[in-house]
Image (tube, rainbow, N blue to C red):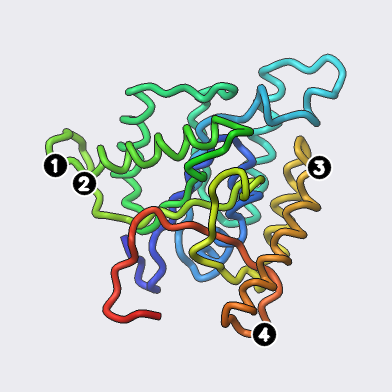
C-alpha cells in the first residue's frame, strides 16, 4: 500500500523485542520522518535469551522481564514513530505453529504493507532469527491466497528485505541495498539507548552504521552520507531501467 506522499506502509517482523532497533531503526525513522507509516511486530519479548541486563537484577521474574522488554521496545518505537504489535509467542525457541502463521498473515492483510523487513535466512548463533524470517515469508504467502477467508482483502506482492544480522559473514548475508540513515541517525541512537537490557550492543551498531556509510559513499552515494543500514532482497526488483 502506498500513502499519498509516496512512502509505502512499512512492516517490520522482529523475532525479539530489540532486534528491530539494532537492525532497522534507521530505515523506520526514514519512513516516519517522511510521514509514512511503520508497524513493528515483535514475535516475542526475548525474555529468555535476549535480556541479560534484566536478568542480572536481583529477584527478577519472567513476568517482570517481559514488562521491562515491552517497556523498552515501546520507548524505542515511540522515538521512531512506529506502531508496535507484541505477539508474546516466547523465545529460545521461537515456536513454529500454524496459528502463528495465520495470525501474522491476518495482520498483514489488515495492514496492507508496501514493504516488509525481517531477519536473515541463516543464523547459526540464533535460530529464532531465521525462524522469524521463515514465518514472515510463509505468512506473506498465506496473506496472498484468495481462498483463505478473512475480513480483510488479500495483499499484493510487497517486496521483502532482510536486515543485517549480527554476524553477517556467518549468516550468508551479502547486502543488495545500502540505505542512507544519516539524517535520522540521532533517532536510531535514542532508540538503541532505550534497550537497556542489551546495552552492550549499542557501540557495535553505532560502528556498523558508520562502516556501512563508508561503503555507501564508495558505491556511488553522496559524500554527505555518514551512516547507513544494509539490506538483502528476497525477491527480484522489477524495473523499466537498470540503475
Instruction: Pick whichever of labels 4 and 2 is earlier in the sequence.
Output: 2
Does residue 95 appear left or right of residue 71 in this picture?
left
Residue shown at 71% from the left, 65% from the top: 211
Q: Earlier in the sequence, mark 1 or mark 2?
A: 1
Earlier sequence position, callout 3 versus callout 2: 2
Query: Of circles 3 and 2, which is in front?
Result: 3
User: Helix, strand or loop at disc 2?
Assistant: loop
Give the label, 4 or 1, closer to the camera. 4
**Pointers 1 and 2 in contact (C-beta within 8 Å):** yes
Quadrant assignment, res 104? top left
> Do the residues under discs 1 and 3 have CB atoms within 8 angstroms?
no
Say whether disc 1 or disc 3 marks the residue closer to the N-terminus.
1
Kindly identify which residue carries mark 3. 200
| Residue situated furthest bottom in the rendering | 223
Assess whether mark 3 and mark 4 are in contact (beta carbons under 8 angstroms): no
Which mark is drawn over residue 146?
Answer: 1
Report x, y in % for residue 68: 71, 30
Q: Residues within 10 Å of mark 3 (few under 14, many from 20)?
A: few
The crowd level at tag 1 (other Cα within 10 Å; few <14, some 14-19, many 20+) is few
User: Where does the C terminus fall, quadrant-wise?
Assistant: bottom left
Q: How far apart are the two marked residues, 4 and 1, measured between alpha carbons?
A: 47 Å
The residue wearing badge 4 is 223
Q: Nearer the viewer, residue 66 or 46?
A: 46
Please give the label number shown on residue 41: none
Labels 4, 2: front one: 4
Looking at the picture, how far across and down is residue 134, in whole percent? 41, 36
Amino acid at each position: 500500500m502506498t500513502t499519498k506522499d509516496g512512502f509505502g506502509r512499512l512492516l517490520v517482523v522482529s523475532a525479539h523485542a530489540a532486534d528491530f532497533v539494532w537492525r532497522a531503526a534507521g530505515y523506520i525513522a526514514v519512513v516516519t520522518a517522511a510521514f509514512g507509516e511503520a508497524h513493528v511486530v515483535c514475535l516475542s519479548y526475548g525474555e529468555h535469551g535476549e535480556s541479560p541486563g534484566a536478568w542480572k537484577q536481583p529477584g527478577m521474574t519472567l513476568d517482570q522481564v517481559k514488562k521491562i522488554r515491552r517497556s523498552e521496545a515501546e520507548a524505542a518505537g515511540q522515538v521512531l514513530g512506529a506502531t508496535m504489535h507484541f505477539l508474546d509467542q516466547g523465545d529460545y525457541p521461537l515456536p513454529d505453529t500454524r496459528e502463528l502463521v495465520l495470525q501474522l498473515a491476518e495482520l498483514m492483510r489488515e495492514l496492507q504493507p508496501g514493504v516488509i523487513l525481517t531477519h536473515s535466512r541463516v543464523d547459526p548463533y540464533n535460530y529464532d532469527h531465521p525462524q522469524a524470517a521463515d514465518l514472515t515469508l510463509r505468512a506473506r504467502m498465506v496473506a496472498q491466497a484468495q481462498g483463505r477467508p478473512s475480513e480483510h482483502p488479500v495483499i499484493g506482492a510487497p517486496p521483502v528485505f532482510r536486515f543485517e544480522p549480527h554476524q553477517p559473514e556467518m549468516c550468508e548475508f551479502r547486502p543488495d541495498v545500502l540505505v542512507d540513515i544519516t539524517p535520522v541517525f540521532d533517532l536510531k541512537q535514542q532508540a538503541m539507548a532505550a534497550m537497556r537490557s542489551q546495552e552492550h550492543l549499542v557501540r557495535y551498531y553505532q560502528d556498523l552504521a558508520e562502516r556501512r556509510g563508508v561503503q555507501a559513499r564508495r558505491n556511488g552515494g553522496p559524500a554527505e552520507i555518514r551512516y547507513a543500514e544494509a539490506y538483502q532482497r528476497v525477491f527480484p526488483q522489477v524495473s523499466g531501467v537498470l540503475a
